[in-house]
Image (spheres, rainbow, N blue to C red):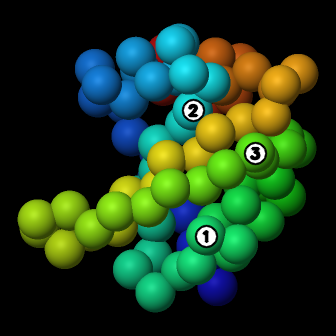
Amino acid sequence: MMVLIHPIATEKAIALIEKENKMVFIVEKDSTKKEIADEVEKSYSVKVEKVNVLVTADGRKKAYVKLQKGFSADELAAKLKII
């Protein structure tokens, strides 16, 4: 099952990419932090340092994925055509 639904490209998400080396994704509601980290690592050939999640008011689940040093959220966002 695909855990990641799509990346987010809002102003706030792009600021996180540039300042904190984090990517923001909408994910399946029943997915765990471990599943999210594993899928990001496998799909995009990067290493994940940390995953934070929240459920939005409209019921969608957002994952904030911090990449380890040496892996660039800027490059990943460019590859995904977010920035």
Q: Nearer the viewer, mark 3 or mark 2?
A: 3
Q: Earlier in the sequence, mark 2 or mark 1?
A: 2
Residue 34 lies, with reference to residue 22, above or below; the image says below
SS class of the residue under badge 1?
helix
SS class of the residue under badge 2?
strand
The residue carrying pointer 1 sits among few (fewer than 14), some (14 to 19) or many (20 or more) residues within 10 Å by Cα, namely some
Q: Amino acid at mark 3?
A: Glu
Residue depicted at 30% across the width and 25% down the height: 12
* Marking on residue 33: 1
CA gap, disc 1 and disc 3: 11 Å
Q: Earlier in the sequence, mark 3 or mark 2?
A: 2
Quadrant in which residue 37 is drawn: bottom right
CA gap, disc 3 and disc 2: 10 Å
**Image quadrant occupied by the N terminus:** bottom right
x, y (%) of residue 31?
53, 80
The residue carrying pointer 3 sits among few (fewer than 14), some (14 to 19) or many (20 or more) residues within 10 Å by Cα, namely few
Residue depicted at 85% across the width and 58% down the height: 42
Inspect this view and state whether residue 24 appears: yes
SS class of the residue under badge 3?
strand
Residue at which label 3 appears: 49
Marker count (numbered): 3
* Marking on residue 18: none
State if disc 1 and disc 2 touch (CB < 8 Å). Answer: no
Residue at which label 2 appears: 22
The residue carrying pointer 2 sits among few (fewer than 14), some (14 to 19) or many (20 or more) residues within 10 Å by Cα, namely many
Residue 9 lies, with reference to residue 62, above or below; the image says above
CA gap, disc 2 and disc 1: 15 Å
